[in-house]
Image (cartoon, helix red, strand yellow):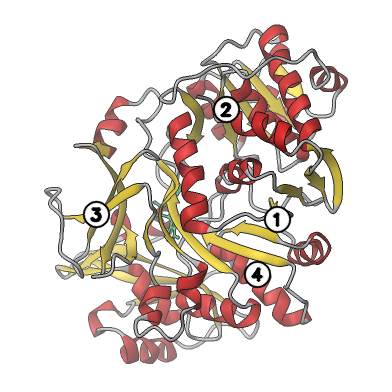
Amino acid sequence: MNIAHLLRRSAMLHGRQPAVLHGDQVLWTYETLGARTAALAAWLRTQCGVVPGDRVAIYAANAPEYLEALHAIVWAGAVSVPVNYKLHAKELAYVLADSGARVVLASQALAPAALKAGALESGLLVFGSEVYRAAVSHAPMDVCDRAPQDVASLFYTSGTTGRPKGVMQTHRNLLAMTACYFTDVDDIAPGDAMVYAAPLSHGAGLYNYAQVLRGGRHVVPLSGGFEPAELVQLAARVRQLTLFAAPTMVHRLVDHVRATGADGSGFKTIIYGGGPMYADDLRTALDTLGNRFAQIYGQGESPMTITALSRAQLADRDHPRWAERMASVGVAQSLVDVRVVDAAGHSLPAGETGEVVVRGDTVMPGYWNNLEATAQTLRDGWLYTGDMGSLDGDGFLTLKDRSKDVIISGGSNIYPREVEEVLLQHPQVREVAVVGQRDAEWGEVVVAFLVAGDSGPVEDAVLDALCLEYIARFKRPKEYRWVEALPKNSYGKVLKTELRELG
Ligand code: AMP
């Protein structure tokens, strides 16, 4: 079994269908994509000395070649290591060394950085180069046979704390994830397309497999990234477009559509996930773009597959618990078990908050070369996610925060997200992150870091009053600090560790 079988199958079944578009222009059909992939795989094996199980890194912004690179690596029986192109040179050097990548596939723009980070000239294959052109027209090889438990990809965690860890994602993990997409997230119909505005090195790239399986179109924006105006135009031209986006991207897209009055009917589905979506933002998104949204909650360790909140559930506004449901991350995806447990690992009843744990075929077998972190994270057959949450009687999971972000003040637990939701209700609060800061008297106190909207910051008293209206007095921030921007990692997640250090 090899996840590359999906492309081989589609190259045969959907050979004449468009596969990869650059902007709105078709670049390759499935037959061509399959042929280029088989050729590149053969090149990796015969010219670069790659043997099954070897790691091959990809260091590039989103580009059409990214897709064939991802597939060629597994086609050759090797392990893909997609590296976020925004990583700092030192982080890249760490990932290349830790994974022991034999070959690095890089874009032209990033090739010098890859060399600086330790990639060998002889092991560097640059997209679009003469050598690359030879590689994608080499005599093809057939898909290398792999066992379901063999590693297909090393997925480096985004590292909001400490060094990134290489999550081993097996062929079985990726296939189970793909199966869940159709049942729990969305179906893919003939003519559908997926646009890669978020980095292919992360969740967006993982969703390419579902699209490949159904012979859907893959759209790489000319900008290679997230530009709201470009995306809206692409949706209008390409139609039936699905976007996977972080909540911050959804926010910006919705702002753009509201400001320009653009028509969003070209979007089929907007899947959001990867971080908390605040209720207020979601309401605006639904009002602006209609019932096109679905949410997923996952982490590299159970890629894209812990829970999902479907389009139908989000659209069911008449449901008596709709407000709670839309603030949740939905229900367990169909091939995983999800529980909420206490510190001793015992299941908690509905309504109680504990750590979210997951079990199933999507769960990684461990971290690459890191037995200690593996033992901490995989216990008694369950993945300990580090996320705190509670299940309701119908199985809807509401996430509170990462366990390490919970603030303990005067002996009481405060979940920052709850405070953030309240502060975001103020129209002049564009972004907010609430953290705990050490305090001699209370242990920790609540501090809110805020980014102001166009008309600037508001008085502390106004925010105090807002908090007192919705949450207990002890949860109210002791300090409001206005900043130009919140520190974020390369995937746009707020680095609360850095904020805590500012104290
Ligand atoms: P990563 O492994 O980099 O994808 O990060 C996964 C983490 O992002 C999870 O453990 C959660 O803390 C957070 N996350 C992912 N999806 C969601 C979501 N839908 N809502 C809230 N947080 C999320």
Question: Taking 69 as reference, is 490 above or below it?
Answer: below
Marks 4 and 1: which is nearer the front?
1
Q: Earlier in the sequence, mark 3 or mark 4?
A: 4
Q: Earlier in the sequence, mark 2 or mark 4?
A: 2
Nearer to me, 97 or 138: 138
Cα distance in 3D space between marks 3 and 1:
34 Å
Marks 2 and 4: which is nearer the front?
2
Q: Which residue is mark 3?
A: 339
Q: Which residue is mark 2?
A: 80
Label at residue 307: none
The C terminus: image quadrant: bottom left
Q: Residue at x 27, y 37 (%)?
A: 378
Q: Amino acid at mark 2?
A: Ser
State which image quarter holds ligand 1: bottom left
Pointer 2 with pointer 1, Cβ within 8 A:
no
On whether ligand 1 comes within 8 Å of the CB at mark 4, the answer is no
Cα distance in 3D space between marks 3 and 2:
31 Å
Nearer to me, 66 or 238: 238
Marks 3 and 4: which is nearer the front?
3
Question: Taking 201 as reference, is 315 above or below it?
Answer: below
Marks 2 and 1: which is nearer the front?
1
Q: Amino acid at mark 4?
A: Arg
Q: Which residue is mark 1?
A: 192
Q: Which residue is mark 4?
A: 252
Q: Amino acid at mark 3?
A: Arg
